[in-house]
Image (cartoon, helix red, strand yellow):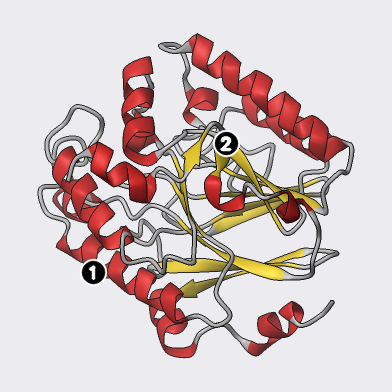
Amino acid sequence: MSAAEAGGVFRRARSRTLDAFSSEKEREWKGPFYFIQGADPQFGLMKAWSTGDCDSGGDEWQQEIRLTEQAVQAINKLSPKPKFFVLCGDLVHAMPGTSWRKEQTEDLQRVLRTVDSEIPLVLVSGNHDVGNVPTPETIAEFQQTWGDDYFSFWVGGVLFLVLNSQFLYDASMCPALKQAQDQWLDQQLSIAGQRKCQHAIIFQHIPLFLQSVDEDDSYFNLTKLVRKEMADKFSRAGIKAVFSGHYHRNAGGTYQDLDMVVSSAIGCQLGKDTHGLRVVVVTAEKIVHRYYSLDELSEKGIEDDLMDLLKKK
């Protein structure tokens, strides 16, 4: 399947928004709802990690196919349906221009085509999707294959912002593209800052931090300077939560009133967590989230206390 053919199914984000949520009615609060967050299906990493060759390994991804199929099946069974399913980056393991990227992409697209057509798919770019140091060419490839690399959309009075966190990590090869996202983000945050939405929530691949805004720099977070700048900017605008992946473990912390939520992977686990998904319930007052193993969500569904939150008007 070519990227153009895939576009009709997967290019959900165009012109910096999502067609599925372009209605003005979505700007109005209508009561509690929920969505599903996943991260890092990363087709190919499990083999690469097991062999210790993460740079050029990854020539098998049958395990990731099965896990992502299980995730989709679990989501499709949920009732009521989630408002959307967001994948927070590292869709495939092969970096731009490397072996198996085309094959991994096509296999993931095949699995994602089985998501219930009434559950919009929200796709976030990760470092393996656009490269650790993105270029205009790698960003263009992502846009052609999956849709915009940053955009906003409204669901039930809540403003959601999707960011390309690689611009915050290393934009040395595409400074103009980073500047464009920065300007766009400031415009979007002004909407949130004026409290014209019930809540505002951000999705990005790389976490601001894993536990504390003051923690040391590492591969799995943004640098102190950048994270503090972004956390302050988000907090001032009233952003309630940032959801991310990248760490392949569950983590998170708070900064002022901002909740930093780091979800483990659908695919390869680098810690002791299980392959899973996060259920996120949005009420008028708060955002409540819980990580489920794929087996738990498949067999038992969402627990009663979360379902009860959806019934409160």
* Left or right, residue 32 beside residue 265: right
Question: Mark 1 sits on what residue?
Answer: 66
Of the residues shown, which amino acid type is indicated by label 2? Phe
Percent position of residue 127, x then y: 39, 34
- Residue 100: which quarter of the image? top left
Of the residues shown, which amino acid type is indicated by label 1? Arg
Percent position of residue 97, x then y: 19, 27
Q: Are marks 2 and 1 in contact (CB under 8 Å)?
A: no
Give the residue furthest to the right.
Answer: 194
SS at circle 2: strand
What residue is shown at x 40% (from left), y 75% (from top)?
294
Question: Mark 2 sits on what residue?
Answer: 151
What residue is shown at x 73% (from left), y 49% (from top)?
24
SS at circle 1: helix
Percent position of residue 145, x then y: 31, 37
Question: Which sits earlier in the primary sequence, circle 2 or circle 1?
Answer: 1
Task: Name the foreground residue: 274 vs 240.
Answer: 240
Q: How crowded is the residue under tag 1: few (<14 C-alpha within 10 Å), some, or many (20+)?
A: few
Is residue 270 shown to the viewer in this render? yes
* Left or right, residue 83 beside residue 87: right
Task: Name the foreground residue: 113 vs 104.
Answer: 113
Would you place residue 170 above or below residue 130 in this image? Answer: above
* Left or right, residue 188 beside residue 82: right
Would you place residue 126 above or below residue 61 in this image? Answer: above
What residue is shown at x 20% (from left), y 49% (from top)?
106
Is residue 162 shown to the viewer in this render? no
Check the picture and name the quadrant holding the C terminus.
Answer: bottom right
Percent position of residue 271, x then y: 40, 60
Would you place residue 184 above or below residue 126 in this image? Answer: above
Q: How crowded is the residue under tag 2: few (<14 C-alpha within 10 Å), some, or many (20+)?
A: many
Q: How far, Cα to Cα, is label 2 from label 1?
A: 30 Å
